[in-house]
Image (tube, rainbow, N blue to C red):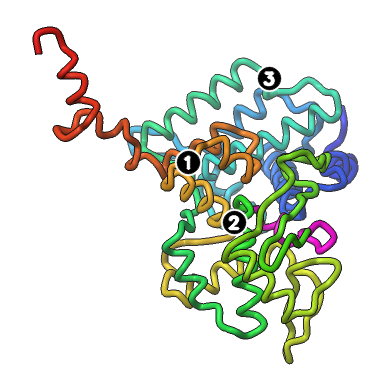
């Protein structure tokens, strides 16, 4: 049995192999620390590996809401809950969101796999409880919290706030680079470098993706080449000319006096989207960095772009995830939705083909 406190630093290092994004590193570390704090407060002892299935079941019961005669409730004792908040392991008292529960369980599962230990998440009772919990939330109408998609029209409103200043040119180029090249993640935008950018002609570029969330090995196959053309290419050309950037990070911080400085960090992409949305009068819509990626796939669905073509640019490894955005875009434009309209050409053809018609 491995003591949690003694092995935590080493475990985090193994779990977060070189190349993981800062956001992933932070979220994994937060999950592991929460497990340790929750267990210590709940059972007055240090959590050890491997974790027993009964412990994971207790974790789910403590943090997931369930229906009772008195309404929705969760099992975490008030004293433990208040202490977790006081120690800043939780932002507020109450149950965790379903996505947070699943994420923390997934991190613990990965930790066991890395250590070659018996994985409590493989236990039948644990898997069944998780499945039933997800179904219960779905039956209550609880939907996964997704950032709204920045489709064409709202994006144009954000772009309209980008003036001819150096920051305005940078933000316009950044937003269009992110969406036109397939809905890039914020880490992919800030890791973009001049060394991977090929200029074919004025305002026409191809960017060669390096390592990404779905391509940890950074293999430069056909899917690694992303177009930056049209408005996006023109905006990028204007930013590079104004900033003088010729090597290293493409998108950089602009300091006072229009001094072009170090590379932006991923959090800056989120701030730019939020600030531009506020300037555009869309601050109540909840747009964030992921809205750029969601916007690309949703707009592709709206325009009836073939899904494989959209996924080739976006780099989505999961068909289910890609379809979630894509279907949201094309659900109302689908021809299948109008099969039974009175004016449907297909229905008329079918009626005419009936015997005796």
The residue pinned by badge 2 equals 180
- Displayed quadrant of residue 139: top left
The residue pinned by badge 1 equals 326
Which label's residue is closer to the chain start, 2 or 3? 3
Q: Position of residue 186 (x, y in %)?
A: 67, 57
Which label's residue is closer to the chain start, 2 or 1? 2
Q: In the depicted view, which residue is nearer to us: 218 or 148?
A: 218
Task: Look at the picture and state if 269 lies above or below 344.
Answer: below
Work out how far the residue at label 2 is from the one at label 1, CA to CA, in angstroms: 16 Å
Q: Residue at x 45, y 43 (%)?
A: 301
**Mark 2 crowdedness (10 Å alpha carbons): few <14, some 14-19, many ≥20:** many
Work out how far the residue at label 1 is from the one at label 3, CA to CA, in angstroms: 32 Å
- Give the side of residue 142 with respect to residue 24, left or right: left
Residues drawn in magenta: 184-197
Q: Position of residue 157 (x, y in %)?
A: 45, 70
Q: Is residue 321 visible?
A: yes
**Mark 3 crowdedness (10 Å alpha carbons): few <14, some 14-19, many ≥20:** few
Q: Residue at x 87, y 31 (%)?
A: 2
The residue pinned by badge 3 equals 122
Q: Is residue 83 visible?
A: no
Q: In the depicted view, which residue is nearer to us: 351 or 243?
A: 351
């Amino acid at each position: 049995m491995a003591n949690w406190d003694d092995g935590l630093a080493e475990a985090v290092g193994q779990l977060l192999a070189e190349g993981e994004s800062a956001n992933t590193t932070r979220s994994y570390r937060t999950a592991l620390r929460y497990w340790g704090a929750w267990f210590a407060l709940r059972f007055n002892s240090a959590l050890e590996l491997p974790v027993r299935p009964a412990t994971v079941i207790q974790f789910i019961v403590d943090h997931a809401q369930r229906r009772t005669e008195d309404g929705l409730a969760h099992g975490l004792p008030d004293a433990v809950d208040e202490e977790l908040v006081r120690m800043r392991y939780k932002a507020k008292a109450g149950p965790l969101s379903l996505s947070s529960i699943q994420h923390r369980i997934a991190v613990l599962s990965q930790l066991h796999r890395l250590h070659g230990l018996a994985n409590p998440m493989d236990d039948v009772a644990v898997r069944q409880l998780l499945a039933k919990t997800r179904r219960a939330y779905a039956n209550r109408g609880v939907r996964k919290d997704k950032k709204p998609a920045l489709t064409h029209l709202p994006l144009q409103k954000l772009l309209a706030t980008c003036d001819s200043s150096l920051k305005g040119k940078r933000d316009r180029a950044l937003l269009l680079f992110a969406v036109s090249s397939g809905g890039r993640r914020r880490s992919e935008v800030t890791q973009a470098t001049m060394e991977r950018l090929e200029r074919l002609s004025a305002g026409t570029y191809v960017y060669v993706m390096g390592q990404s969330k779905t391509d940890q090995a950074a293999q430069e196959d056909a899917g690694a080449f992303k177009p930056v053309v049209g408005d996006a290419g023109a905006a990028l050309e204007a930013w590079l000319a104004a900033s003088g950037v010729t090597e290293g990070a493409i998108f950089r911080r602009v300091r006072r006096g229009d001094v072009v400085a170090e590379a932006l960090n991923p959090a800056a992409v989120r701030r730019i989207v939020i600030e531009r949305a506020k300037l555009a009068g869309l601050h109540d819509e909840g747009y964030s960095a992921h809205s750029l990626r969601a916007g690309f796939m949703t707009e592709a669905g709206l325009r009836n772009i073939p899904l494989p073509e959209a996924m080739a640019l976006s780099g989505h490894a999961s068909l289910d995830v890609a379809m979630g955005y894509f279907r949201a875009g094309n659900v109302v434009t689908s021809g299948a939705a109008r099969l039974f309209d009175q004016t449907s050409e297909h229905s008329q053809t079918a009626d005419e083909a009936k015997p005796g018609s």
